[in-house]
Amino acid sequence: MSELALRAADVRIELSSGDAVIEGIDLQVGPGEILGLVGESGSGKTTTALSVFGYHAPGLRMTSGEISIAGEKLGDDGAFRAARGRLASYVPQNPGTALNPSLRVADAIEDMIRAERRNAEGPHRLLERVGLPGDRDFGRRFPHQLSGGQQQRVCIAASLAPDPTLVVLDEPTTGLDVVTQDRILKELLRLRDEQQVAMLYITHDLAVVAQIAGRIAVMYAGHIVEQGPAAEILRQPRHPYTRGLMAATPDHLRPRVLGAMPGIAVGVGERPPGCPFAPRCEQRKPRCEGELPQLEPTAAGGHEVRCFEWRRTPPVDWVALEVAAGGEPNGPAILEVNALCAEYRGARGSVVAVSDVSFEVAPRGCLAIVGESGSGKTTVARAIAGLHPPASGRVLLGGEVLHGSAHKRTVQQRRRIQLVFQNPAEALNPRHSVAESIARPAQVLRRLGRNETRVEVARLLEAVRLPAAAGERYPGELSGGERQRVAIARALAAEPEVLVCDEITSALDVSVQAVVLELLRELRDEFGLAVIFISHDLGVVATIAEQVLVLEGGVVCERGVAAEVLGAPQHPYTQRLLEAAPSLSAAIDGWGAANVDPLAPRP
Amino acid sequence: MSAAATGAGRLRVPLVRSVSGDWGGRIGLFLLFVLVGLAIFGPALAPHSTTAPVGIPGEGSSGSALLGLDFLGRDVLSRTLSGGRSTLLLATAATTLTYLVGLTVGLIAGYSRSITDPLLMRTVDVFLSFPALLVMLLFVTAFGGGRGVLVGATSLVLFPGVARIVRTATLEVSTKGFVEAAVARGERTDAVLRREILPNIVSPVVADLGIRFSWAIILIASVNYLGLGLKPPTTDWGLMVSENREIISSNPLALLAPAAILALLIIAVNLTGDAYVRQRNRSGDGR
């Protein structure tokens, strides 16, 4: 075997307080290999990725371990700094902020070439290599004139400029729509095949990693808990955390009940002395709480797991969804949208955002609105909530026609429809405590008194599975998942009959997403809530909705029962979306059966 | 409001406690405290009358008059001790009025999304285009140099800047989810502005407050310096700087003492405001 592209041995990075952010990290990436580094937010993925370059975020330092790229050892000296630029490059998570907005695309890439003085190819050839037009016109564009996918490809082109041995990609497709994501993944695979570039691909999405990575390393609380060939791990995960992640990953080809892992990830400095996953683990033994297990090999080649009890880890339950979650919708429609058209006033006249959209939802029912960004999904949600008066068409609630503007609706009408917003960071007023935020709708829309409100806030916090003490906290002190649950609690405080959820899980980790989806299912069962679920993630849609509406450019291109639309799409756009959507089960099926068939029904 | 209001304590820490979190804030607060104390109790401590001459005009420092005598032979120390009330009152009143008008105009313009916004802002721009001192002088000549006129004219000069900052901050906040949620549940516009938007634009507004307060002091002092504002024998730090310019060679202290104290006041206000913003951002971001 030739020299490794990346070798990290026993890397430990700690805070100035001495608490380890990551520890005992051993990673090896061979030439032309793609290693998927998987983990949820806070697991230490990005810290690990940046340590490859000898860079640590302020306040962090590497206290032990050794990292070498293509045989050159990382040190503090200038020699490594000089070598680093030619050996490895980095593709950051958010291409929108990674590119200098005042530099033309070709100039940005030219900078990388000049910095390394290795002008193998000009910027235009590099742009062609990532599937962008290589003509002068394109090179002269500014980043804001490109789509998100194009920006990300420019970043990848720039990273290829020094002809590196290793490219580190930090969540490069998060935030892009599935079609663009699919195209970028295919291009990365092609680049790997053509040029033998090794890649460290960081992501939280197992379905994506199954498509691209040859090997996987799973991180939890700063440790690698399992690593090995992708096919081995995903066919038979041995660590309970990996198994939990798989169970929580929705899949549009095989809709099933998502398994929500109990508890939440431990923060830096709160880690228990033993196995960090022990507090959430269903198969822990007393030993797990006092002693940290080492990575030990399982039978399969190169598959290692950090768990004493890995032999007991059961295969993933692929419990198929029976009828759609939440049971049969009952009764006549509670909300009806009729020939809705909405426009935006732009600088040059009005732009049609949505035209002629009609649908209805019954109590307990769930309708998903699917589409890429810019398809008009959010406009529909805002029109229902009375935030965007439609240009024409009607919204009916329980048979009554609603006024286009929330201000002109009755208190009861406003109470019965509630909206949960996409971005949990902005959904809550940072200057109001959690209890204040939740209390307000109950006071304004239900006219509850002081004591009733207090009782109600406590009940709602419990309903969204937050501790009572969370009421005193402020949004800035909560994680993304916690904030989103507060936002849901605030909507529920109005005792709504229709809940409009606008991409409410897109900013969340899969395990938190599973909890939120499970919560929505319970609410539908218990209170007969009708849900309009807006999403671009077909896996999530398959899990939660029984009706689907596919929007493209503000026009409905397909609608119907979820299983039928997702199983046998008729419209070419739906077909394209479904083809591009990554699926864990499809990847596993592609690898063929393992010793134990994870998809076979369990006795 | 009810149960919820009780949980609101933590971010709305009293100014004093939040500001004393760092050295800049502590120094600023201490200076403010001393200067306000001086303005309140100074007149009682004055060794001589503020209006009657006690010696030869422009006499230097001596045993009976530590800071010497001014251009009419009055005791500079006594006048400095007594001059704070007028300056502090005028500047505070002018700043308060500036913010009342500026916040109202800025919030309404930033939130309205209708013809109101350009209408208000273009009017504000017209005010901005006049030289500050010219407007002040125009007002003072037309309506006389009374305290009310000074305060009103100063606010007229200063409010456009405040309105612009408030409008920009409001525009940014009003697209956030929590504002939309409030609109969707039918909150009245004034409740949305007061509960949802105002608390989230306090940081830029307070950061700016120090500068506006300084401007108010300087503007009023300039008008006084030109002899068009407060009329002698009023004791006012700004006025003192202007009156004594003729005796700067014989008793420079008559000019330096009020000037130095004005500078200290401006520094104190800026230090306190900056510390408040720092502290607030720290507790707001949490985690």
Image: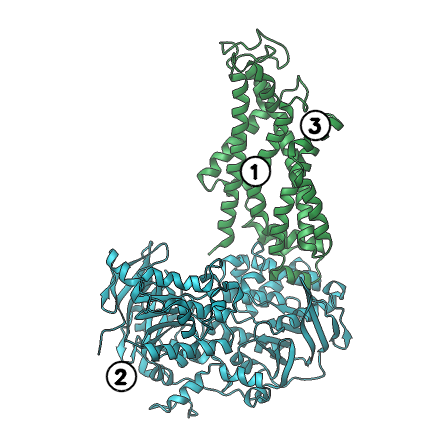
Chain A, hue in figure: cyan
A396 or A440: nearer the eye?
Answer: A396
Report how far apart the C-alphas of labels 1 and 2 lie in the structure. Answer: 69 Å
Q: Is residue A196 visible?
A: yes
In the orientation shown, which residue stands out farthest toward the front? A136
Q: Nearer the viewer, residue A564 or A552?
A: A552
Q: Residue at x 64, y 25 (%)?
A: B86
Residues behind callouts 1 and 2 on a single chain = no
The Cα–Cα distance between marks 3 and 2, rounded to whole angstroms, is 89 Å
Q: Secondary structure at mark 2?
A: loop
Mark 1 vs mark 3: tell me if same chain: yes
Q: Secondary structure at mark 3?
A: helix
Mark sitting on residue B147:
3
Q: Could you say where residue B212 lies in the image, as x and y percent from the top left?
A: 60, 37
Residue under mark 1: which chain is it in? B
> Disc 3 residue type?
Arg
**Residue that numbered label 2 is attached to:** A301
Q: Is residue A203 above or below residue A365?
A: above
| Residue B244, placed above or below residue A24 | above
Residue on which the image places disc 1: B211
